[in-house]
Amino acid sequence: MSTRFISADRNQPLLLPPDLRQWVPDDDLVHFVIEAVDTLDTGVFKVNLRGSGSAQYPPHMMLSLLIYCYANGIFSSRRIERATHRDIAVRYLTADTHPDHDTIAAFRVENFDAVASCFVRVLEMAQELKLLKVGRVSVDGTTLKASASKNRNVRYDRAGELVEQLELEVRDLMGQAERADRGEGDDGQKLPDELSRHKALKEKLEAARHRIEERAKKKAQAEQAEYGRKVQEREERGGSAKGRDIQPPDPTPRPGEQENLTDPDSRLMRHNKKSP
């Protein structure tokens, strides 16, 4: 009985231009963030008033991008840039535009206080709408999830405390973004330049596979003499000695065999557990 598979052709072009609205569920958090930010005054944000140089991204879009990503634990400006390509909700939020990481970081740095203030206002609106969380940020002031909890009915004096709590939360998230950009290195998500093209990547992978296979064959050849010696010893003993069967050298690579695509001569070093 033959198995039928659903066609998954990555090279199949779309018959019609994609409508990103159809790719984002109606209940996705991104809709709330966009609508909430659209109610805020972004006139205080720093922009190039002269309008010279490259076209600028709208402040309300950049603000929505930062709030949505920070609330969902994406702090690095490089990761946010990548999310504008990878994440459907983020791609919808940015209307399929892709601000680079320098632009994202500069917007946060130049408008740090304004971003933090607007972030708190968005979380306050979420409180009013009785949302439990905005992404990873709790906005109800309690870890209890029961709708009937008395903690959902906030007194006036307690409301001020919750706003202060949200302000601290936002400052912490903004601080994480600052630290992420300062200490940013290779996040393991970007291919080296020589592998960034599809054809070059395929050629490198084929060459790596070939080197792995050649190494396995050479290893098997080197072990052949030892294998022959063990077989001869067992035959001289009549083949009746107890013990595991002697396995011939296997010329096929083990599943865990690795190869560095950019530096074939390098190898992963094993840690010595006995070393201090």
Image (cartoon, rainbow, N blue to C red):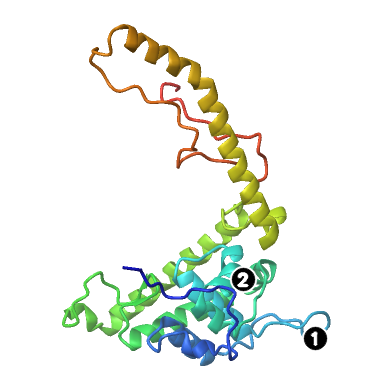
Asked which quadrant contains residue 268, the reply is top right
Q: Which residue is mark 1?
A: 51
| Residue ID at (43%, 87%) | 32
Numbered mark located on residue 152 in the image = none
Q: Is residue 118 above or below residue 198?
A: below
Q: Residue at x 40, y 72 (%)?
A: 5
Residue of label 2: 108
Image quadrant holding the C terminus, namely: top left
At 54% from the left edge and 90% from the top edge, which residue is drawn?
A: 19
Q: Secondary structure at mark 2?
A: helix
Q: Quadrant of the N terminus?
A: bottom left
From this view, report whether residue 185 is shown above or below residue 245: below
Please say if the residues under marks 2 and 1 sit with CB atoms less than 8 Å apart.
no
Total labels drawn: 2
Percent position of residue 114, x then y = 58, 78
User: Residue 159: percent from the left, percent from the top?
Assistant: 32, 80
**232 displayed left or right of 54:** left
The spot of residue 273 in percent (x, y) is: 41, 25
The kind of secondary structure element at disc 1 is loop
